[in-house]
Image: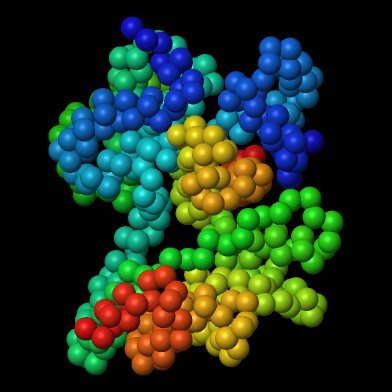
Amino acid sequence: MENPKDWPGDDPEAALKQLYNLNYPWLENYIRQNSGTEEDARDIFQEGLIAAWINLKEGRFSGQTDAFSAYLRQICKYKWISQIRSAARKRMQYTEDVSVFEQAAEHTAVTEDQLLEGQLLKSSFAALGEKCRTVLGQFYYQRKSLAEIAAAQGNTEESIKTIKYRCMMQLRKIYLEKHKGNGEV
Amino acid sequence: MEKYNQEISRETFEQIENYLLDRMEDRERQLFAQRMAADAQLAAEVALQRRLFTAVETGSLFPDRQPSTSDRAKQNHTRWYAAAAVLLLVGCAVFWFFRKEASLSNTGLYAEYYRPDPGLPVEMGIADSVAYTFYDGMINYKEGNYRAALSKWQKLEQMDSSTDTLQYYIGMAYLNNGDTDKAAVLLEGMTKRADAPFYERANWYLALAYLKKGDKENALLRLNKIRSYPGVVSLINKLME
């Protein structure tokens, strides 16, 4: 069995799509059965995935691919239960025993801070302009070369490099400001 | 000492990027790791950039922009106001629909034909401050940050450094930003002389601006001046249907 730490390598797109295909349908079904919508499922999956992905990249998760999927599911489940228990969602019906909440917390080793981090990173990226998101996605997610991106946009490689740098600095600024707003950094 | 610098240079960013994307030779990687061990701020910056890369990777998995959970929480608070506003709007919309049916079809054609001008390739290493500011704004324009582009280009206008190119791209920035009236005023000025540098393009975008405003007559007037321009004949035919 493949070690997930080797997945991202040169192809994060393939690794993340694999995780999505393996886990998203399960999560959507789970959330729909527990008072949520498809939109909730997408939010929770994205935030849970960031938290899990950070832990993987920063060496806090070591294990095999199937164990990583189970880990991701637990994080998402934990996040959803946490959300529906919050005051705004008190009226919702939850089909499982709430003691699952505590169990999930123990097993995921993901803290509220890490989940908040996922939320901040997700909303920071979403706050960028469309062009920035496109260029950064093509370079870091699809791992296209500067030459490929430049050719597709009728631009020079040097311009794309400059745009990429400036977009990353914008993302950095947005993220640090959001963190400050949460009393950190 | 602050954990992070206010800004990081492009050189530092590119070194961190090469480190994180595993694009360093072994020796270079070793040296960089030694620098991180001795420099807590650099180590913190590497960790920060790793997280930002994660944001890009995971954010790109869902390319369409999703409102965040907190955004949606805010939406919930305003739901009742929205419902009241919707009722009011429905009344207005019925009235508006019958009055503006024709202009709606024009707006549809605008959406079908409008493609933002992609901007000019950015020239690097320019010493001249006017040209530098222009290309700096052009980078903002290409990023889709039209407000930032406008603020830089308008400074050039105030410095009497205006050119046809500058005027044209200010007009394009307005148009892309949804300020159709301001764009139309600028583009009008560029369509007076048939030998003007941006004559055809300015007429084309001016026609589209009129179309967006529901002014079919003025749109046709502009289009008929540039019948050989790509897309013009087909748009005229659709407008005449």
Residue B11's x, y, as percent? 75, 36
Most foreground residue, B225 or B78: B225
Q: Is residue B96 left or right of residue B187?
A: left
Instruction: Name which quarter of the figure residue B159 lies in.
Output: bottom right
Determine the residue positioned at 70% across, 68% down.
B152
Q: Residue furthest top?
A: A1
Determine the residue positioned at 60% across, 88% down.
B193
Position of A20 relative to B33 (above/below) = below
Q: Is residue A181 visible to the viewer in this orientation of the structure?
A: no
Residue B214's x, y, as percent? 35, 86
Determine the residue positioned at 31% across, 51% down.
A88
Q: Is residue A138 visible to the viewer in this orientation of the structure?
A: yes
Determine the residue positioned at 17% across, 30% down.
A96
Q: Is residue A172 left or right of residue A85?
A: right
User: The N terminus of chain A lies in which quarter of the figure?
Assistant: top left
Position of B57 relative to B177 (above/below) = above
Instruction: Name which quarter of the figure residue B3 lies in.
Output: top right
Most foreground residue, B225 or B153: B225
Most foreground residue, B174 or A79: B174
Q: Is residue A53 left or right of residue B80?
A: right
Residue A138's x, y, as percent? 48, 40
